[in-house]
Amino acid sequence: MRKWTLLGMLYLCLMSAAVAQEVHMVKLPPPDMHGGKPLMQALQARHSTREFSVKALPQQELSNLLWAAAGVNRPQSGQRTAPSARDWREIDVYVAMADGVYLYEPVGHALRRVVAGDLRARTGVQDFVATAALNLIYVANLDRMSGADAEQRDFYSATDSGFIAQNVYLYCASAGLGTVVRGSVDREALAAALGLKPQQKIILAQSVGYPK
């Protein structure tokens, strides 16, 4: 009887952990591939915005944005909307919103919460970062960059982050959203807040929201 009681308790603990993990996952709706401005009009409209409304993005808009940023556009290979040097796919996209910071998982098109609470103000030094709907944080996992030396890791992680940031700029121009990419970040403090490991390096941040 005692053996089965212990097994039952273990089962309940495992089930509770699984439920807790599930709560922290947000499955995004499929991206809407229709609508928006044509490419040439989006390029004409592309600009940086530094004044944002506090209005949150609807989940469909968030889905479209993240897929445009770094979603899987070739399911057979898992390759993304943004190019990646040597197909390292070393850039992870973190999303800081009012209720927490999430890691975007391109395969599965979902968000996994990594930190609870509002950390938007920690993603930059400008006042507007604290109230923009969300701030994207581009983090390079250097362990994925096999065969690269330190100079190559710095160069290619910066380049690959730039590709993603430009995808976000074009999507925002097409969808009527505002955005600005930012290099002024207290990287050490933000890395600590996100619980990043030594091989994870913050490259850039990018605010997104409705223009004020």
Image (tube, rainbow, N blue to C red):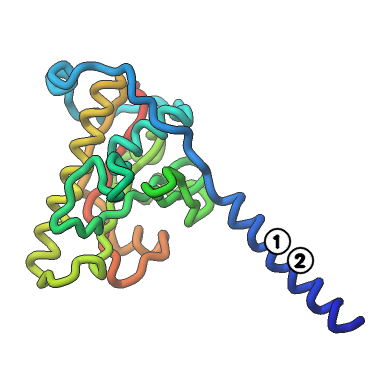
Where residue 91 appears, as percent x and y from the top left, is: 26, 55
The residue pinned by badge 1 equals: 16
Where residue 35 appears, as percent x and y from the top left, is: 32, 17
The answer to whether 165 appears left or right of 135 in the picture is left
Is 193 located above or below residue 124 in the figure?
A: below
**Residue 206 appears in which quarter of the rendering?**
top left
| Residue at 42 percent of width and 65 percent of height | 195
Quarter of the figure with the C terminus: top left
> Which of the labelled discs sits on residue 12, or is there none?
2
Q: Residues within 10 Å of mark 2 (few under 14, many from 20)?
A: few
| Residue at 17 percent of width and 26 percent of height | 47
| Residue at 52 percent of width and 44 percent of height | 26
Is 183 located above or below residue 18 in the figure?
A: above
Q: Which residue occupies the foreground of this view, 117 or 9? A: 9
Q: Which residue occupies the foreground of this view, 39 or 93? A: 39
The answer to whether 11 appears left or right of 86 in the picture is right
Q: Circle 2 — which element?
A: helix
**Residue 86 appears in which quarter of the rendering?**
bottom left
Instruction: Residue type at mark 1: give it.
Output: Ser
